[in-house]
Image (tube, grey):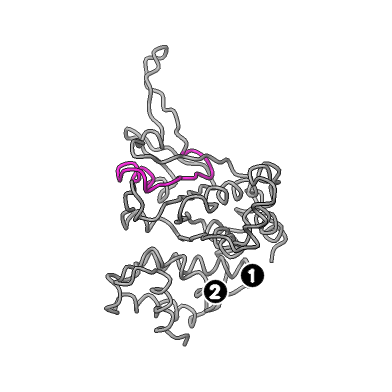
Amino acid sequence: MDVNLSTLFDSANQVILGKEHQIKLAVCCLLARGHLLIEDIPGVGKTTLSHTLAKLLGLDYQRIQFTSDIMPADIIGSSIFNASKSEFTFHPGPIFNQMVLADEINRATPRAQSALLEAMEENQVTVEGVSYDLPSPFFVIATQNPSHQLGTFSLPESQLDRFLMRIQLGYPDQQAERNLLTGVDRRFIIDELQVMLPPERLSQMQNEITGIYTSPALLDYVQALINFTRESDEFNYGLSPRAGLALLTAAKSWAYMKGGDAVLPEDVQTVLPAVAGHRLKSSNSNSDLVVESLLQHVEVS
């Protein structure tokens, strides 16, 4: 593993205790130039994880608290009339940062949620017919509460599909929670974090990931997984071509993080729950069981 990544994981694990796999998935997502959705109950460290990654990656960071009355202009900015110049001047909103935390995104109305769509897909926003480029790199980490909680609006499929991965943190184990209870406040630890993977090295790694080899046999396996979701009656609808590309890109990123130069089937299997869990719908509401069933039905050729 690259020394930059190794030190980054070590530092992140000092802040987010007992969640090594979720931290690796989050970094995998960012290396693959993807946006991340963290779904879980309040208070398990969703915001802390995003702030930690921003500090370790040296990225400009802004949190947007989504509420039921937030407006698109509160996210992307607006044009305000400048009386001295007799013209409208665009004032950028908080979306113009390298890493944006869309906190509790499903507490906002669909209109406000949709304000993120163009930004996440095109790395730009359009205000009154004028397009404005967003910073590079640009990542959105969104958090959402479980849909059964009061005051939430479910994200539409088009919005969910913009997220390369969805992960859940869950409760810490007993030892990790004891360390949290007896340790230093996480906010103080975050303040002391140093940049472990500067943006220029991050960009270099992203370019290197595109060169990870995928054999014809590996592509056969990926296509078999995708085709099964489309042909099986178990799913309401199958994975889209964009989802297939997301799966392959995430698998390349995971292989790269391990120090490999080619994607293996186990790389695909590792990232599949995070990539496909929020894209597949079935009568079984447990996304982990849905993905597990998929892996059981499709064998590695």
> Disc 1 to disc 2, how far (Cα)?
9 Å
Residue 112 falls within the magenta-colored stretch = yes
Q: Which region of the structure is painted magenta?
A: 95-118
For the point 58% across and 46% down, which residue is it?
A: 51
- The location of residue 219, given as percent across then percent down, is 46, 78
Q: Secondary structure at mark 1?
A: helix
N-terminal of the pair, mark 1 or mark 2, is 1
Residue wearing tag 1:
258
For the point 36% across and 64% down, which residue is it?
A: 279
For the point 35% across and 69% down, which residue is it?
A: 239
Residue wearing tag 2:
267
Which labelled disc corresponds to residue 110?
none
- The location of residue 11, given as percent across then percent down, is 69, 54
Vertical placement of residue 255 versus 42, above or below: below
| Residue 297 shown left or right of residue 207 in the figure | left
> Within 10 Å of the Cα at label 1, are there few (<14), some (14-19), or many (20+) other Cα atoms?
few
Q: Toward the viewer: 285 or 245?
A: 285
